[in-house]
Image (tube, rainbow, N blue to C red):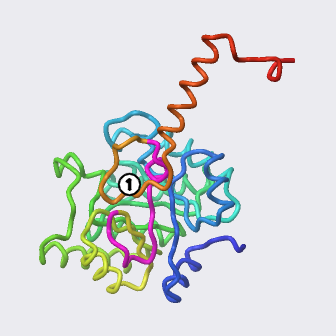
Amino acid sequence: MKKVTPKILLNKKKSQEKIVALTAYDASMAATLDVQGIDLILVGDSLGMVLLGYENTLPVTMEEMLHHTRAVSRGVKQALVVADMPFMSYQADVDDVDAVRNGGRFLKEAGAHAVKVEGGVEMAATIKKMTDVGIPVLGHIGLKPQHVLKEGTYQVQGKTPSQREQLIKDAKAVEASGAFGLVLEGMPAAAAKEVTEAVSIPTIGIGAGSDCDGQILVINDMLGMNGNKTAKFVKAYASLYSQIEQAVQTYKQEVVKGEFPDDKHSY
């Protein structure tokens, strides 16, 4: 299998071959996904909620993202590793020095092959400065988790004609800035279809219907590790929460009863 690159993802869009993406936050899970031929592995800032216990993604730091990206990179041989740039690591500096420096750190220090940033028209100039110096960028429009305090909640985008028009403007601006692809999050399937058809770069949907060029889910959601706490768009392909719960209870009972370790598991 060839090493996945942004060009390969573009060719998949041209040939109408779906892109398969998932998140990972550690080397062992990344290696497991890589062996299965996943095209793109995102080290999402969702790790703040999934692993670190934060209420949302906003507290996640550069050092936390670099730490987990290094781990994922060590487990991957084929997939394209994309690191989420955390909140305020690319938005604060009007000259985009922070964006370029921090984006470069993911490539130089953590082994990522690309970074992801949220925003459309308002982030186009920043994305261009990053791509101009050789940092591959995956855009992200629609529902933007890093805007949760501004929006007040996680709201589906693109329900009205004006919102759909803005989504297309955002997508085209991100494409013109040099981004190699777009994550489309939290929008009606019809809106995502319009955006996908409006740009030549691949779109990867999450809660955006089936007409995107690819799909991504948070690995813990996909494996059913969160019980019933999942969004409407999530399909759990396993029920690991209940399996882990049962395994832990069985272990606890055997230890309490003195049944573990037995002769078979002792030296």
**Total number of numbered discs in the rendering:** 1
Measured along the vertical axis of the image, is residue 122 above or below residue 29?
Answer: below
Q: Which residue is mark 1?
A: 90
Q: Residue furthest right?
A: 267
Is 209 colored magenta in this rendering? yes
Q: Residue at x 58, y 68 (%)?
A: 39
Is 14 placed left or right of 59 in the picture?
right
Q: Quadrant of residue 127?
A: bottom left
Measured along the vertical axis of the image, is residue 70 above or below residue 193?
Answer: above
Q: Quadrant of residue 201?
A: bottom left
Q: Position of residue 236 (x, y in %)?
A: 44, 54
Return the residue nearer the eye: 154 or 87.
154
Q: Position of residue 122 (x, y in %)?
A: 26, 66
Which amino acid type is shown beneath numbered disc 1? Tyr
* Span colored in magenta: 207-225
Is 238 colored magenta in this rendering? no
Measured along the vertical axis of the image, is residue 231 above or below residue 172?
Answer: above
Is 169 placed left or right of 229 in the picture?
left
Q: Position of residue 37 (x, y in %)?
A: 64, 66
Q: Residue at x 53, y 24 (%)?
A: 249
Q: Quadrant of residue 57?
A: top left
Q: Quadrant of the N terminus?
A: bottom right
Q: Position of residue 135 (x, y in %)?
A: 52, 66
Q: Quadrant of the C terminus?
A: top right
